[in-house]
Amino acid sequence: MSEGRQAPSPKDSREPRRAFLDGVRLGVGPAVAVFVLALAYGSSAVDEGWGVTAPVVFSALAFTGSGQLTVLAALSSGTVLAAVTAAILINARYVVMSVALNDSLHGGRLRRVLVAQTLADASFVVAHRGSGRFDVPRMVGASVPQWACWVGGTLLGALLSPPPELAYTLGLDVAFPAFFLMLALGELRGSGRAAAAALLGAVIAGVLLMVTSPGLALLGASLAVLVGARTGSRGDAAEEETG
Amino acid sequence: MRIWLSVALVTVGTSLMKASGPLVLGDRTLPPVALRVAALTAPVLLAALIVTDIGGERWADFEWTRLAGVGVAGMARLLHAPLLVAVALGIVSTALLRLLPG
């Protein structure tokens, strides 16, 4: 096992390419929303005295909207330790996602570590093929337009500082939740267990959102997957075969 | 200095969290129970993302025009509109609703 897991055979080589391009196509929708968010982030960073280089480098290397926005807000009134801790907590959901993704990654450990860096919320859900399996080329493809728009949007926002009400007037803040709803409609079709877990996750997120940030609400909502596992242990075999 | 230190620490921390699956589990595969949990990660995350995107921090960003736009997008998709078309319809609906007086 030291050489890692087997990659797809050469005869399947067209499949990863097709999945990658499919991912790029599916990544365009969230990339639009990412671009708008990045404009606001870049503009705010300049207002907070970050200059142009630091936010752009941060976007290129970290590629984490929620974490970067948290640092920007927390650092303006707190210490480095407080800002970094808050961002790490916000991003802790990546641990859950990375563990879930691990079985679907191919190649040696270094290759899998590098591929896992393309992990992003929208890419993760786009790549889900059901039953805990993920289409990794599709995930990577979906992250490409999002990463480009995140870095490009940060740069443009830092240079141009567009008025924040512009995106609101154009209704662009709908793009993210609408896109996630599109994916949810596909995910929940025909799976009662997934629907029950999703409903519980939404309720937990909604309640936690009353007292905390979206990042921590997302982390708390991930507990809903444990209830789904308990349902499975009772022997929901029929759904597992059909769903 | 504070800015660059924060950038470096969060970049490294996020990178390690994204790599935690391969780093911690290595070549080991998940047991069946954990696979069932993993299968629910995407739908649970999606549902929670919809709620947090609509509500914002402490529900301060909640607004009916956004909710209506998301609803229009969902209806369009259920009526078999292509994904990007459905999202675009949701965006346009919200923009138009915001033009209404009051």
Image (cartoon, coloured by chain):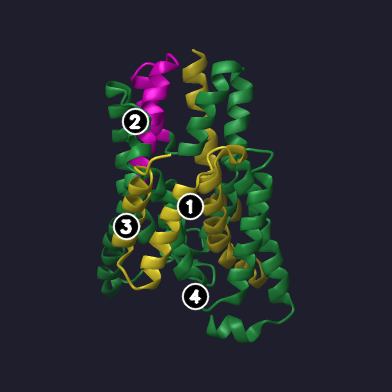
Please tell me whether mark 1 or mark 4 is closer to you in this view: 1
Considering the numbered disc 2 on the image, is that residue within a helix, a strand or a loop? helix
Circle 1 residues within 10 Å: few <14, some 14–19, many ≥20: many
Considering the numbered disc 3 on the image, is that residue within a helix, a strand or a loop? helix
Three-letter amino acid code at disc 3? Leu
Question: Which residues lie in the magenta part?
Answer: A33-61
Circle 3 residues within 10 Å: few <14, some 14–19, many ≥20: many
How far apart are labels 3 and 1 at the CA level? 13 Å
- The chain carrying label 4 is A
Q: Is residue B8 magenta?
A: no
Kindly identify which residue carries mark 2: A154
- The chain carrying label 3 is B
Residue B39: image quadrant is: bottom right
Q: Residue at x 59, y 35 (%)?
A: A88
Residue A56: image quadrant is: top left
Is B70 or A94 nearer to us in this picture?
Answer: B70
Does the CB distance between marks 1 and 2 fall below 8 Å?
no
Kindly identify which residue carries mark 4: A189
How far apart are labels 1 and 2 at the CA level? 27 Å
Which chain wears green?
A
Is A74 or A96 nearer to us in this picture?
Answer: A74
Q: Residue at x 31, y 34 (%)?
A: A153
Whichever of labels 4 and 2 marks the residue nearer the N terminus, that label is 2
Kindly identify which residue carries mark 3: B89
Three-letter amino acid code at disc 4? Arg
Q: Which mark is residue B67?
A: 1
Whichever of labels 3 and 1 marks the residue nearer the N terminus, that label is 1
Circle 4 residues within 10 Å: few <14, some 14–19, many ≥20: few
Q: Residue at x 59, y 70 (%)?
A: A195
